Amino acid sequence: MNVVRHRLWQVLVDAGIVALSWWLAFELRFDHGPNVPYTHLLQRSILFVIAIKLVVFVAFGFYRDPAMGVPTDPREPLGRLHRDLRAGPEGLSSREAARRLVGYGPNELRRRRGRAWPGELAAQFGGFLGRTLCGGLGILRQDLRVLQFAGCAL
């Protein structure tokens, strides 16, 4: 969950994008910019919002080391590739290989039977977000029925 030193520029760019998004949300919410109480809210909350977003990004591994599972560019220079993978031209040292074996397990592919696409689609609705989406759609459907019963044109 740590931030790699050469990814700090990405953290700064993301912080800028989050700040711009937060400011823009206030600007677009009010036609001609927010009034005084909301301007104070924007000023008091923007650093808090940036901090929360960056913690979430770090927690989800957005800034992790490319050698730890993120694919590398096959066209990059060999020296940079060795540095990113923490390996030399002769491969991994036995100590590094043992460390990775303990940390990540054996380097093998496991075959497993994949589900057909209908099963994959059904599995998407089994999680929390899928159930929340289905519940929201049910509520929306009920609201539309009420509006239609009340004679509102849709």
Image: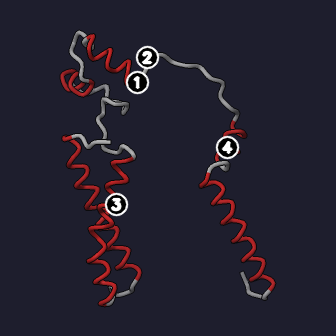
Q: Quadrant of residue 63?
A: top left
Q: CA distance from mark 1 to mark 2?
A: 8 Å
- Pick whichever, 131 or 116, lies toward us: 131
> Disc 4 or disc 1, which is closer to the eye?
1
Side of 149 relative to 35 (left or right): right
The reply to whether callout 1 and callout 2 are in contact (CB within 8 Å) is: yes
Q: Under tag 4, what secondary structure?
A: helix
Q: Which residue is mark 2?
A: 107
> Disc 1 or disc 2, which is closer to the eye?
1
- Residue 147 x, y percent position in the rendering: 74, 83
Q: Residue furthest right?
A: 149
- Residue 5 x, y percent position in the rendering: 19, 41
| Disc assigned to residue 52 | 3
Which of marks 1 and 4 precedes in the sequence?
Answer: 1
Q: CA distance from mark 4 to mark 3?
A: 30 Å
- Pick whichever, 41 or 149, lies toward us: 41
Q: CA distance from mark 2 to mark 4?
A: 29 Å
Q: CA distance from mark 4 to mark 1?
A: 27 Å
Q: Under tag 2, what secondary structure?
A: loop
Q: Under tag 1, what secondary structure?
A: helix
User: Mark 3 is on which residue type?
Assistant: Ile
The reply to whether callout 3 and callout 2 are in contact (CB within 8 Å) is: no
User: Mark 1 is on which residue type?
Assistant: Tyr
| Disc assigned to residue 104 | 1
Q: Quadrant of residue 52?
A: bottom left
Q: CA distance from mark 3 to mark 2?
A: 36 Å
Which of marks 1 and 3 precedes in the sequence?
Answer: 3
The reply to whether callout 4 and callout 3 are in contact (CB within 8 Å) is: no
User: Mark 2 is on which residue type?
Assistant: Asn
Which of marks 4 and 2 precedes in the sequence?
Answer: 2
Q: Quadrant of residue 1?
A: top left
- For image coordinates 72% across by 66% down, the residue present is 138
